[in-house]
Image (tube, helix red, strand yellow):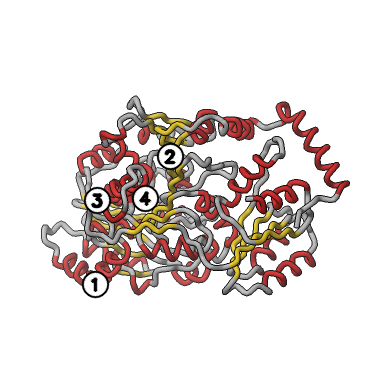
Amino acid sequence: MKYTANAPQGFKYKLKRTVKKIVQPFRISEKDKGKLLYNKFLSMPVNDKFIFYEAFAGLGILDNPRAIFKYLLNQEDFKSYTHIWSVENPELAADNISEFSSLDNVIIVKRESEDYYKYLATSKYLINNSTFGYYFEKRNSQVYINTWHGVPTKYMGYEHTAERVENARGPARNFLLADYLVSANQFMTEVMYKRAYKLDGLFQGKILELGHPRSDAIINPNTLDVHRKLNTAGIHTDKKIILYAPTWKGTLYNNLDYNVEDFKKTVAKLSENIDTEHYRIYLRVHYFLYKILANDPELRPMLIPFTIDTNELLSVVDVLISDYSSIFFDFLATKKPILFYVPDLEEYQSGRGLYVPVSRLPGYVSSNINDISITLGNICTSELVNPIREKYLERYSKLHEDMSQWCIYNDDGNSCKRLVDVVFRREPVSELEGDGVYSVINGLEAHKEKILICVNTNYNDMTFYENLRKKLESYEYRTTDVTILTTSFTDTKYKVYFNNNIPKEVRVLVWYALPYVTKYNQKFFKREIKRSLGNVRFDEVLMEGTLTEYWAEFGNAIKKL
């Protein structure tokens, strides 16, 4: 069928859009002017030797993108390439970016500045460990590599117990746009990409199981350089480092679940039994928590600046204390002691959920801070040969070995090289060097009928959502793959009902209107479809809710692909 908006609504809609377009240059906000510029930059040619990087929404030159970047900098066949880094706050990240900012082929741009939009639109290669904004369009001539930022320990995406759709929407859209997804191992591919973000049956790109690029910094450490950075930041390296690195426990909206005074008591207790002549405790926390703890005079000297890359830091850490953070997966390669302090284990398991059972964690696990402190003290003594430490490592050696075999089996210090060989040099996986189990998975197509349902959520009517739920429950999901594309909800009550009552087999993607008005034509809608859905092709397209001119044309454009 052909979708058509009703005439009165279509006329009003066109009139409203015409007026908006006329007043747009005078009414558009400063923030949205950049997105309008981005739209214009998308018509400029793509530069085949531009590589654009972003990590943690512009926090700095960090993580997997940093590792790939550093590898490329040292390769003769990439000397003519220009590297562009997106940084949210160049002043706060000055220590981090100064390492490379003097290089002629490195450009630092402020995130969401005019230059940011220009290079995002015109760089051949795009490398991100998180997500680009809702306005992002991957052009056909661009190559998007999403590396993500860790092997999951806690429920992710659509499996997140508290924020199912909210947690999945940004990553799911970005993953569908990506040409390559980097996976540390088969577990990450199966559990996170295929299941948690429901890419199975839909993803059109390639998944690279070639190892974690950022782990190269642990396998091939530059200890002197890391110590220099730490000393410059005021972190003493004359003693061995115990790193306490709890996971992020806020929400998507930066609401913190940490009590600073309780946190200080925990840190004090951890320090109680260690040999302070030979050990110091330092803290690696999420950036949002870092900003709060940095205001505390007692904790400030213990904080490792976010500008120091985590994996480079781990290469000089002697003992790690964590909880549900994926940092411990990377630390496995050091074969050093790990302790797990989990004071809220039952609450966390029921409220968020864990992929890795506590019984499989490769170290002492306790919810009692006194027990953790005593165990830590027994491990961290002045003895050159500490029999208790040796017994500790021996006690957990089987768990450590088992986890290493399924988690870091490809982390041999050459993960960056393999990624560059496959993506940039176009070498076949069969010719890659190394003893790992390397795999390039070409798409995740499934033999199911793929149905797209576009839902305009302007309806503030519970009957509408109840009928939609019944319709979704009627599908046979063994043979049918259903994707819902919704507009943003205006009423929280209906959003909560919708998110909590749709079948778990259904993936939900959220459509966001662009903050500017442009000409509606076939070219525009092809771009809108790709912005929202990547390169996915559907067998059937259905519309639920008010059928505006936009959604009528959107549906018709999908059918023409």
Query: In terms of sequence position, does the residue under pointer 3 or pointer 1 come before the other?
Result: 1
Q: Which residue is mark 4?
A: 284
Cα distance in 3D space between marks 4 and 3: 23 Å
Q: Is any part of residue 115 visible from this angle?
A: yes
Cα distance in 3D space between marks 4 and 2: 31 Å
Residue plotted at (48% across, 57% down): 249
Query: In terms of sequence position, does the residue under pointer 1 or pointer 2 come before the other?
Result: 2
Query: In terms of sequence position, does the residue under pointer 4 or pointer 2 come before the other?
Result: 2
Q: Which residue is mark 1?
A: 398
Give the image location of residue 135, x and y in percent. 59, 41
Within 10 Å of disc 2 (Cα), the crowding (few <14, some 14-19, many 20+) is: many
Q: Amino acid at mark 1?
A: Lys
Give the image location of residue 28, x and y in percent. 69, 32
Q: Amino acid at mark 3?
A: Gly
Q: Which residue is mark 3?
A: 413
Q: Nearer the viewer, residue 43 or 148?
A: 43
Q: Which residue is mark 2?
A: 125
Q: Are marks 4 and 1 in contact (CB under 8 Å)?
A: no
Residue situated furthest right in the rendering: 8
Q: Quadrant of residue 107?
A: top left
Q: Amino acid at mark 2?
A: Tyr
